[in-house]
Image: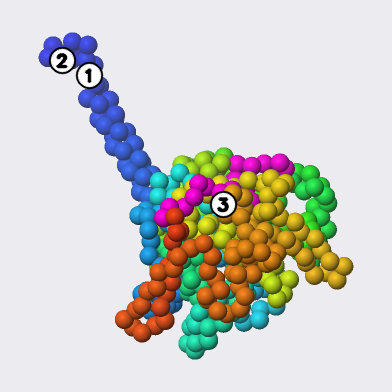
Amino acid sequence: MTDTAGAPSGASPTGAGVIRRRRRRLRYTAIGVVALVVGVAGAGWAAYEKLDANITPDNAAAAELARYEKERPTSLVRDAQNILLIGSDSRSGDENRKYGRDSGTERSDTTILLHLSADRRSATAVSLPRDLMVNVPDCRRPDGSRTEPMFAMFNYAFEFGGSACTIRTVEKLTNIRIDHHMVVDFNGFKDMVDAVDGVEVCLKEPVNDKAAKLRLPAGKVTLDGEQALGYVRARKTLGDGSDTDRMDRQQRFLGALVNKVQSNDVLLNPVKLYPVLDAATSSLTTDPELASLRGLYQLVRGLRHIPTEHVQFLTVPRTPYVYNANRDQLVEPAAKELFARLRADTAVEVAKELPEDSAARTRTTESSTGNRTENRTGDTTGNATGNATGNTGESTAENSYGGDDEDSYESSYDYEEESYEDGKSAGKRFGSRAGTPDPAPTFRGNTAAEDTCG
């Protein structure tokens, strides 16, 4: 007979074994959880390392910019940031080569100056036309030789001197300090669109562009990466064939892309975010400070809460160049007003259409010879309007670029001469004679919240 007198009430003789088995199961469960955490962490670290390694630091540009630090503009507003986004037309590499022959050089097919307000409540993206006539400084070529200063089309800066030359050209043109820059090629753009499962656009008429291999029906269409690239680069077969129309189309597409990313909560979902980051970083070259996931995260973190209606796109006010209608020149004082407001981190308003009686209204036609004739009198209303005819007033567009003489660039702004100890030529800093920019003028543009079919 078994003696159970010493056993606690309600206990069975096998209770100790059950407890031991439960303890073993708990240990196995704990080990499994730890293994899972380690596995996920390992996969996460591997993903982090892959994304981190994707980004190419632009050390050559950093060194070149450091050489000219004394002549660069200063930032006026703490925490506001200006980022230069450069879409390169490089044909190097297997994927990019199919878009044309690799000539050994590359030009900036698209360049956007992105201004982020200090409070991160708004973002303003300003397109800089590739055909804009500008003063390009002396720059270092990839082979180490240097170019002479020249008056040339804007995209020559990238061809001759890469991103550093482009940044210096933009800074001299706008007097805005460029804090960061990013360069993306064709393939990177394509992959970004595919990573968000395409972007919807609205076409007023069917598209059949043999050069871009683009065939699309009219109406709402979701473009994949390959189609999107053809859509934003096509010129002659879409719209009126002008570069103005092409830049408007690029801005609307980028707005739709931003809207897609935000509406699908991509930024908050790691599963959705990873392919986007992989696509974005695989063909990305940035300044060294941004050339890591940590650097990009610090930048992107502040963008999550910007409403799409506060993400604005516009093109710098310009008009056909007085000596060549196929080139552009700035319209003053409209352009300088825009740059001054961005530098001071003050409000800039955009509208799809400007008033009929506004001198800023854009009109574009195509001559029978195929040369464009455009009247883009500032693309702005209010105090920033300019006269693009070049006939009357000190604010005429002709005053902007009458030649290489920098003195012809003056309008309603005072210049403060600066001299440098290194003996380099003096720089010029401008400010409004009134001291503070006038109430926000309206520029022709759109926001990311607008429907592409609107």
Residue under pointer 3: 383
Which of labels 1 and 3 is toward the front?
Answer: 3
Mark 1 / mark 3, whichever is N-terminal:
1
| Crowd class of label 1 (few under 14; some 14 to 19; many from 20; radius 10 Å) | few
Figure colour scheme: rainbow
Disc 3 and disc 2: Cα gap in Å?
Answer: 96 Å
Q: What kind of residue is marked 3?
A: Asn
Q: Amino acid at mark 2?
A: Ala
Residue 56 location (% of width, % of height): 47, 69
Q: Secondary structure at mark 2?
A: loop
* Element on which disc 3 rests: helix
Tell me what residue is drawn at x 80 percent, y 52 percent: 216
Q: Which mark is residue 7?
A: 2
Asked if 335 appears above or below 130 in the picture, the reply is: above
Quadrant in which the C terminus appears: top right
Position above or below: 88 against 379? below
Q: At 53% across and 57% down in the image, what residue appears?
A: 338
Q: Is residue 415 left or right of residue 2?
A: right
Q: Earlier in the sequence, mark 1 or mark 2?
A: 2
At label 3, counting other C-alpha atoms closer than 10 Å, the crowd grade (few under 14, some 14-19, many 20 or more) is: some
Residue at position x 43%, y 47% from top?
A: 120
Q: Nearer the viewer, residue 84 or 435?
A: 435
**Which residue was labeled with disc 1?**
13
